[in-house]
Image (cartoon, rainbow, N blue to C red):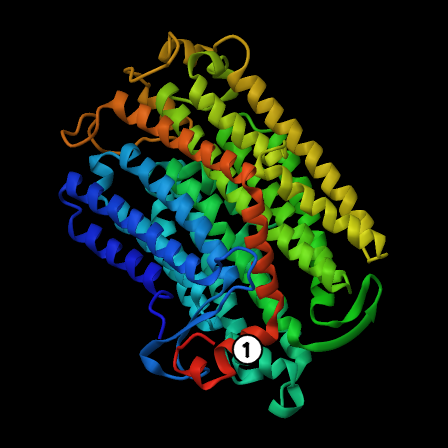
Amino acid sequence: MSTAVIAPLLVALVTAIATLLTRTNDTINRGVSLLGGVGYFAAVALLFQRIVLPLGSEGQTLVYQVSGWKAPFGIVLVADPLSAFMLALTAIVSLCALTYSVLFVDGFGQRLSYHPLYHFMVVGVTGSFLTGDIFNLFVWFEVMLMSSYILVLFYSGPEHTRAALNYVVLNLLGSAVMLLAIGGLYATTGTLNMADLARRLADPATYDVAVAPVLGLAAVLFSVFALKAGIVPFQFWVPAAYRAAPAPVTAMLAGVVKKVGVYAIVRLYFTVFAAASLPVSLPFISGDSMLAFFGPVFFVMATASIVVGGVGAIGREDIDGLLAYSSISQVGFIILPFAVAAMANSRTVQMLGVTAGIVYAFNHGLAKSLLFLASGTIQEAVGTARFDQLGGLARRAPVLSAGFLLGALTLIGVPPLSGFFGKLLVFQTAADAFALDAIGAGAALIVALVGAVLTIAYYTRAWNDAFWGAPGSAVEAAIPSRWTGPVSVEADESAVADAGGRADGGTANNVSDPPASFALTGQVVVVAALAVTVIAFGIGFDAVYQTATTAAKAALNTEGYMKAVLGSVGALVGVVA
């Protein structure tokens, strides 16, 4: 039995418990939390090495049967190249956000159990990527969301309470709908194990499964994943929640938590439900797989997300609002190639579409986390993120400004940054499908072009208003000279509260808190480190592409997934299939 599969989950869980036990001592709590974050990164690296390396290989699927109970009856954890790819993103973003948190969250916040909540959120994310059955996907979703509910409400102001209430109510409704859909799937198919579900859908006559009801239940389930990912029309919670949460939490929500919904869409609809044969010939819908029904749905929702998010971002008056609406638009870019892949009858286009989607998800996770951390640092240093009070940051805080610029250029798609290759793959997917006369491919090209123009427009506006030109009133007051080292930067607390930033009930000068100058400089260092990471993945994009291609093959290889979990005696006892 391969314990490497559960190593990231165990490290995150032990860290959450350890930080809960040490929360009364700020220094020890921070140290334990950071040590746990490094341990989680190492555990994911070990698992990644076991599954994906060497690059270019077919990859492996590691299966862990809890307590030795055989699938499909026991709880199963499955790590394949797709889950390893998503865990790698989680490890990078969570370590950067955690390091930022150590500098950002004051002693009062430590005693409010910030770090235990953070690590329990990571536990939920990790379990979601590793689970092998749909019911436990629901369980891990709830572990992740329960922590995020409190973290969104962390500052407890009126705006934060209102945002958290909307976030909680919408996600609780989504969870209830998800549970109903899962119950329906179990009643219809007799199983919740993903591999066993795919096996039964591939041969419904043998297992007496009615495929048509499964399609309806899959549609209901998709609405829940769309809610988790913030896809239009389920995006209403995103702007308020992102503005209310602390900067490192927002970085995790946008960079990682959203990707759990994206992962669930890929895993269930391309790996599991695609196994069902369901011939259909309707206007704009044709094919012999359940994916044919979902392709147009993916396309409409992706298009709406790109347009609504892009137009909304252009009209925002502050950086966090712009970034929140940008996240809605960018998740549309992730779903768009999935739509093209679902509607295409070509296996090559399907492979390219899934690869493009997960590459874009990876780039968005890194770049958007970078941007939200940069925005948090601006609010800490200046006291506001409103465009009418900013300006001239490129002169006064050049390193911080460079980090923001690199994140923006990554999402715009400027070479040689990794975002360029992600956006290129999205266009290539649509172009290849168009060459094969696939339904909706031409429209996908137009939508992608419109989205690219909108991205350029709102990030150009952000740069011009916040970083270029003469320093605004808040910048002039807070950073009177060029910020090149540890300087003491005073920020008006009421201005921060008005801007949706930090306004907690802690004291301003806790003994265990790092000095303000050191904390701010440390935050800039984290932003710079993440910016360098983005550059490194752009220069070494071939490694990202090969890994994503292997992950896409795993996602589309339903037979291989079934064989790994169910197909041999070795797999049944938890040995690598």
> In the displayed structure, would residue 466 be above or below residue 556?
above
Image quadrant occupied by the N terminus: bottom left
Compared with residue 450, is residue 122 higher up or lower down, i.e. above or below?
A: below
- Identify which residue, 28 or 46, lies in the foreground: 46
Q: Amino acid at mark 1?
A: Met
Q: Is residue 336 left or right of residue 381?
A: right
Q: Residue shown at 40%/49% (left/top)?
A: 91
Which image quarter: residue 50? Answer: bottom left
Q: Nearer the viewer, residue 252 or 360?
A: 360
Crowd around label 1: few <14 · some 14–19 · many ≥20 (10 Å): many
For the point 37% across and 26% down, the residue is 524
Is residue 340 visible in the rendered image? The answer is yes
Judging by the rendered image, the residue that carries numbered circle 1 is: 562
The picture places residue 81, in percent across and down from the top left corner, at 51, 61
Q: Is residue 150 above or below residue 193?
A: above
The answer to whether 308 appears left or right of 15 in the picture is right
